[in-house]
Amino acid sequence: MDLRIYQGILGVVRDVLLAAAPLAVVFLISQFWFLKYRKSQLVRLFKGTLIALFGLTLFLQGINFGFIEVAGEVGRALGGLSFSWVVIPIGFVLGLATTLADPSIYVLVKEVEDSSGSAIPRKLLLIALCVGVGGAIALTMVRLMFDFSFLWIIIPGYILAVFLTYFIEADFAAMSFDSGGVVTGTMIASFVLPLASGVSEGLGRGNEGFGIVGFVALIPILTMLTIGLLLRVRRQRRRV
């Protein structure tokens, strides 16, 4: 058994505990102030917290041990191909896969479905987010291949996003911008970002893979806002 996999795990445990400490403090204050959970509820919460911390520790250790390095090597290999255009469809597929593999996505789609009274089906939202993230990563690969500034997309994209918020419900607009933050989670930062950096190096452009997180945050926002606009138009037609 390769014991190197355990190198640095104590540091990961420390980081996880430090990240969870503020949440624990807030919960303890809330518990004594107004929550007043029963003992059985506290035990269940404690067990769930331990499972989450354990899982997060294993996940981060796996990322540090090989995930980031492997993603960079794969990116450099793809960027060095004579038919490097293949990184565009591969980027789209990876966007779909990383979105489906991110547990925070499922939390978002469930919350949106519940808060909308099932007006926004979970399946529709999941498909929209997957396609949005896939398109964002494919667009990033196009930028790396043709070497143009990401500002040409980011600035008009966010202007369009703000413009669309005037035509949909405020709650849906808030959900849309939340989706941009959720999809740029652990899978994007740990795999897709080093992959894009590797592709950039393979294409001979140096380490220019940064900016992908901005793309990934923007495209799902626009996707969600578009869904909100279409739903509003459909409701208005039904009223006529």
Image: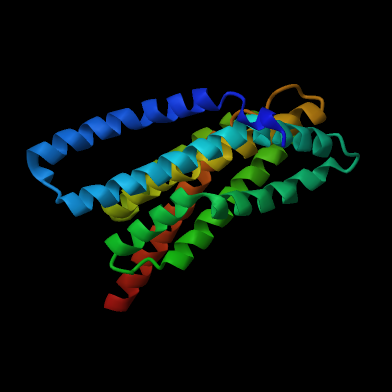
Pinpoint residue 19: horizontal percent, then vertical percent: 38, 29
Q: Is residue 211 above or below residue 231?
A: above
Return the residue nearer the eye: 240 or 23: 23
Pinpoint residue 75: horizontal percent, then vertical percent: 76, 36
Pinpoint residue 37: horizontal percent, then vertical percent: 15, 49
Compared across the picture, whether 92 is left or right of 78 comes to left
Instruction: Count the labels in the image.
Output: 0
Q: Residue at x 47, y 67 (%)?
A: 123
Return the residue nearer the eye: 61 or 132: 61
Quadrant in the picture for the N terminus: top right
Return the residue nearer the eye: 117 or 21: 21
- Furthest residue toward front: 1
Return the residue nearer the eye: 10 or 52: 10
Quadrant in the picture for the C terminus: bottom left
Q: Residue at x 81, y 44 (%)?
A: 85
Q: Is residue 117 visible?
A: yes
Q: Residue at x 77, y 33 (%)?
A: 73
Q: Is residue 215 visible?
A: no
Pinpoint residue 70: horizontal percent, then vertical percent: 73, 35
Compared across the picture, whether 204 is left or right of 100 comes to right
What scheme was used to colour the molecule? rainbow
Q: Quadrant of residue 23?
A: top left
Q: Residue at x 37, y 25 (%)?
A: 18
Compared across the picture, whether 46 is left or right of 140 comes to left
- Furthest residue toward left: 33
